[in-house]
Image: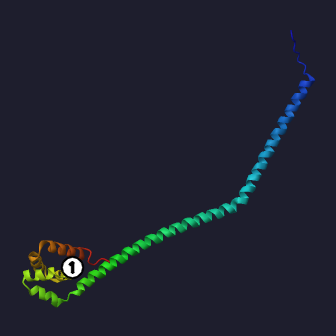
Amino acid sequence: MIRFDDRPRPQFAGRMTLLFAFALATATSTAAFAEDMAEEIARYCGNVASTVQDQRYVWQTKMLARLQEQLEQRIATLEEKRREYQAWLEERDKVLGEVEDHVVAIYARMRPDAAAAQIAGLEETKAIAVLYRLKPREASAILNEMEPGRAAQLTSALADKMPRRGQENQT
């Protein structure tokens, strides 16, 4: 039977002391390592902070330039629409201005069937201008005597050129 006594054996005690010393050294070196790493991280962050900030500024500048470009495109689109509308208004004013009152008076005094034949042969813009300046009763009598296809074409064009209710005085 093997008997164990309570006496520490010298070789076992030496090993325990070594193990304890190693554990203490490791704990101390781990704490020192953690402190060194924290200092290294702080130095690294301090060193790259200006570079990171510069990169952020570059990115923000690019984003602002992109937004500026989009804004300029939208402004250009709106400006094109404004020019389109302005051209339409100028064309409308030109059409209305082409026909003088005395020409309209001539058509107003004609018989509706004769006026219909004459107006049907005019360019669309001039025919619209004449019909626009005639009194509604005279214009309807002339359109009534005109070929239905041409009358419908002129009526449609006339409706497109006339201002809508509530839009006459808007800017």
Q: Secondary structure at mark 1?
A: helix
Q: Based on the displayed image, in which of its 4 quarters is residue 43 positioned? A: bottom right
The image shows residue 99, relative to residue 167, as above or below, that is below
The x, y position of residue 62, in whole percent, is 57, 66
Residue sitting farthest toward the top: 1
Q: Amino acid at mark 1?
A: Glu
Is any part of residue 163 visible from this angle?
no
Q: Is residue 126 left or right of residue 33?
A: left
Is any part of residue 103 visible from this angle?
yes
Q: Is residue 95 left or right of residue 47?
A: left
Quadrant of image for the N terminus: top right
The x, y position of residue 131, in whole percent, is 16, 80
The x, y position of residue 100, in whole percent, is 20, 89
The image shows residue 73, relative to residue 125, as above or below, that is above
Residue sitting farthest toward the front: 121
Q: For this rendering, which residue is in front, 31 or 119?
A: 119
The x, y position of residue 60, in whole percent, is 58, 64
| Residue at image point 26% right, 77% down | 168
Q: How many marks?
A: 1
| Residue at image point 11% right, 81% down | 117
| Residue at image point 41% right, 71% down | 77
Q: Pointer 1: residues within 10 angstroms few (<14), some, or many (20+)?
A: some
Q: Is residue 60 left or right of residue 7?
A: left
Q: For this rendering, which residue is in front, 67 or 32?
A: 67
Q: Which residue is mark 1?
A: 124
Q: Is residue 53 left or right of residue 159?
A: right
The image shows residue 109, relative to residue 166, as above or below, that is below
| Residue at image point 51% right, 67% down | 67
Q: Based on the displayed image, in which of its 4 quarters is residue 154 positioned? A: bottom left
